[in-house]
Image (spheres, helix red, strand yellow):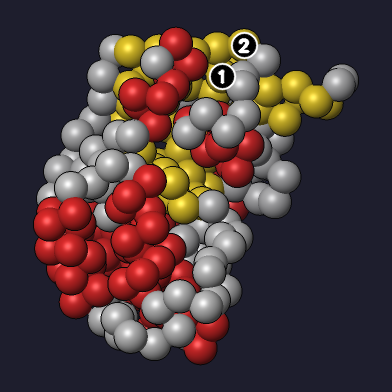
Amino acid sequence: MLRAINLTKKYGEFLAVNGISFEVGKGEVLGVIGENGAGKSTTLKMLVGLLTPTSGEIHYDGRNLFENLNAIKRKIGYLPEFDALYDNLNAKEYLRVFAEIYGVDADMAEKRIYELLETLNLPDDKPVGEFSKGMKRKLSIARTLVHDPEYLIYDEPTSGLDPSTSLFVTEYVRDLGKQGKTVVFSAHNMFYVESACDLLLIIKKGRVLYFGELDALRDRMKKYMVSYRIGEREFEDVFEDVRDVNRLLAEITENGGEIISIETRVPRLEEIYFTLTDGKSIMD
């Protein structure tokens, strides 16, 4: 279990992160969304110990991150938005470097590297400098996994990638959750977040607008469209509360009307996001 407890980060008088709290369990994937400057990257950097919170705590399996930094960091795979690679090495050599840094047994490292390169469709003998942007991003993801960490913190894993590679990475992130990894990732593209995550964290100006299950949020914001006929006239009404639908149905029946259709419309994440980012929190 990863828990962030009332995280705050100040730079001088500027409050970049303001009281963010959430928790993510084993096998869960948390998507973090927000506009540029919302505090996403700052939050993720605090989660991996690259930044120290001004206040608040981060716990991994009940242990305070900054009181057990070295031990906990070995359980984390971190992908920054921009990653520096060694262009003169091939993929296998590059991953061996990090396997050694993490103290992975040599035989286990070779097995792990082979599996990662195979799964991510990467050549093992081509210099990294000749890789495409998508291949480099997949190699960076392989680096985060070479020591088989329990926790994965990914900052914009699909940034700048073509649609095909973005979809591949998104599906891979989702599969990592199914394998039991705890995943936190940020993204601008709502489709990829919607495709991969179980939990959602929406941030605006350093504050939490929503944290919880994506499906619960979509259910909370669904609408009902009722088409009906009274006499020669046809009508269509939209409701957010099913009780209002029931009242309308009773009125239609009383007036001798006819119900044409009732549709439930579940909004896409992009619609939800733009509805919420008027600044109002829907946290209970």
Alpha carbons under labels 2 and 1: distance apart: 6 Å
Q: Residue at x 67, y 15 (%)?
A: 54
How crowded is the residue under tag 1: few (<14 C-alpha within 10 Å), some, or many (20+)? many
Give the answer, above or below, for where 158 lies relative to 198.
below
Give the answer, above or below, for where 48 lies relative to 33.
above
- What label sits on residue 55 in the rendered view? 2
Q: Residue at x 70, y 35 (%)?
A: 205
Which residue is tagged 1?
Answer: 7
Say left or right for 37 vs 222. Answer: right
Name which quarter of the figure residue 173 lies in: bottom left
Tell me where residue 231 appears, x and y as whole percent. 32, 68
Tell me where residue 244 appears, x and y as whole percent. 34, 39
**Can you see residue 205?**
yes
Q: Amino acid at mark 1?
A: Leu
How crowded is the residue under tag 2: few (<14 C-alpha within 10 Å), some, or many (20+)? some
Q: Residue at x 18, y 63 (%)?
A: 110
Give the answer, above or below, for where 161 lies relative to 281.
below
Say left or right for 29 vs 119. Answer: right
**Can you see residue 141?**
no
Give the answer, above or below, for where 49 lies relative to 58.
below
- What label sits on residue 67 in the rendered view? none
Say left or right for 283 vs 114. Answer: right
Question: In what element is the residue under mark 2?
Answer: strand
